Image (cartoon, helix red, strand yellow):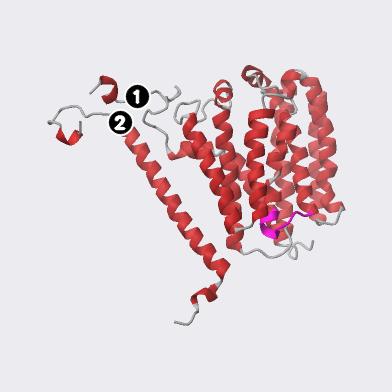
């Protein structure tokens, strides 16, 4: 019997754990690999896709679809953390994640991610329908491979193109409920797609040091803050009318028209503030405000769509 | 050598888990069991929903 074989492993939680050594990982660490906050947004937008889709869907089937979409999103998160563990370790925002903190090995995260990805797609295909399963598989592939492994470290357009991955869930939900792809589901996709750049670039403006240290070519790192501010404003100018289009196209009611108009005007105002305030603390405050409000903005848009679909008569819409 | 053949007080072969590691392993095992049970319930309910209640009504 060797000393090495019988010793108790006592790694501190801030050191990477060598493969084959016993795990300290708790259930919470595995939940953290799923990126629960991202997952909650995915669940919410997918739910809107499900309830707004034409036709009837049994609540159990709808719940199953939502569960599979959520787990698929979680799998993408785990695969992202597996691949990006080196980046996560040097960024203040992510250095406490399970892999850089040494509580989960990269191999465990990879196995966890692949298992959940395959499982969620298979269950969605078997219990709901093939189209939604195919879309979910493509979403996971797009996020884990196209965005994480390729775009993120290669181009400042990473989150523009990669934003498609976050925009697919309402389409997957729509396909799960209706078996098809409608114009409204494409609009929901486009709203999230054009929302992503101003949202992430606002964050990147005041976290650009983190991204530079990690070698991630975010727009503020590569093109500078001025160009980023200009791009944020341009994308917001595209986003606001796009977000109002379901009302103008007759797909959403007056309530949505009012909420998307008012919140869109606020979003635009904050983007203009980010564009104009370029120095010191006011510049950071403006970027933080835009980042925070952008989350509320997307939530409001989808919440009103959800309410209108569930209780149209009660709201006179 | 099997640990069962060891004398009292003799150190066991292989990796010895700390109490914290044992607790973590137990919580992970319970979580896996809960997930498997939930999947069984889900598959059962979805089967009933897809086949309909008439699946239970058949000539004996």
* Residue on which disc 2 sits: B18
| Image spot of residue A303 (x, y percent) | 70, 51
Q: Is residue A57 above or below residue A150?
A: below
Total label count? Answer: 2
Label 2: how many Cα within 10 Å (few below 14, some 14–19, many 20+): some
Q: Are marks 1 and 2 on the same chain?
A: no
* Residue on which disc 1 sits: A10
Residue found at the very far bottom of the displayed protein: B59
Question: Left or right: where does residue A115 sit relative to residue A225?
Answer: left
Q: Quadrant of residue A210?
A: top right
For the residue pair A3 and A236, the one nearer the viewer reads as A3
Q: Which element carries disc 1, helix, strand or loop?
A: loop
Q: Dividing the image into 4 quarters, which one contains the N terminus of chain A?
A: top left
Q: Which element carries disc 2, helix, strand or loop?
A: loop
Residue A265 in view, yes or no: no
| Image spot of residue B36 (x, y percent) | 44, 52
Residue A71 magenta-highlighted: no
Query: What are the residue bounds of the magenta stretch?
Result: A174-182
For the residue pair A16 and A313, the one nearer the viewer reads as A16
């Amino acid at each position: 019997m060797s000393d090495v074989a019988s010793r108790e492993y006592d790694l501190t939680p801030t050191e990477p754990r060598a493969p084959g050594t016993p795990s300290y990982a708790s259930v919470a660490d595995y939940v953290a690999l799923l990126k629960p906050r991202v997952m909650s947004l995915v669940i919410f937008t997918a739910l809107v896709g499900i309830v707004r889709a034409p036709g009837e869907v049994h609540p159990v089937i709808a719940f199953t679809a939502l569960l599979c979409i959520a787990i698929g999103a979680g799998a993408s998160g785990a695969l992202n953390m597996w691949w990006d563990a080196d980046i996560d370790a040097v960024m203040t925002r992510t250095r406490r994640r399970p892999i850089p903190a040494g509580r989960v090995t990269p191999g465990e995260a990879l196995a966890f991610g692949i298992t959940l990805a395959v499982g969620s797609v298979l269950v969605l295909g078997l219990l709901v329908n093939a189209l939604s399963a195919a879309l979910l598989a493509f979403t996971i592939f797009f996020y884990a491979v196209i965005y994480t492994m390729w775009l993120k470290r290669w181009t400042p357009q990473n989150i523009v193109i990669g934003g498609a991955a976050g925009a697919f869930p309402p389409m997957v939900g729509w396909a799960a409920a209706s078996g098809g792809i409608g114009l409204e589901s494409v609009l929901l996709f486009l709203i999230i797609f054009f929302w992503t750049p101003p949202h992430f670039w606002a964050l990147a403006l005041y976290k650009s040091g983190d991204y530079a240290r990690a070698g991630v070519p975010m727009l503020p790192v590569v093109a500078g803050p001025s160009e980023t501010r200009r791009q944020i404003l341009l994308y917001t100018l595209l986003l606001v009318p796009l977000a109002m289009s379901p009302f103008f196209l007759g797909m959403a009611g007056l309530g949505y028209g009012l909420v998307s108009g008012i919140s869109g005007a606020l979003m635009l105002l904050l983007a203009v503030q980010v564009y104009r305030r370029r120095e010191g603390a006011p510049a950071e405050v403006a970027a933080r405000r835009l980042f925070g409000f952008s989350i509320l903005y997307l939530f409001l848009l989808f919440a009103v769509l959800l309410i209108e679909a569930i209780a149209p008569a009660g709201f006179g819409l | 050598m099997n640990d069962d053949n060891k004398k009292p007080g003799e150190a066991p072969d292989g990796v010895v888990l700390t109490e914290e590691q044992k607790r973590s392993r137990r919580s992970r095992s319970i979580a896996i069991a809960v997930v498997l049970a939930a999947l069984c319930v889900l598959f059962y309910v979805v089967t009933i929903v897809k086949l309909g209640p008439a699946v239970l009504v058949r000539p004996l």
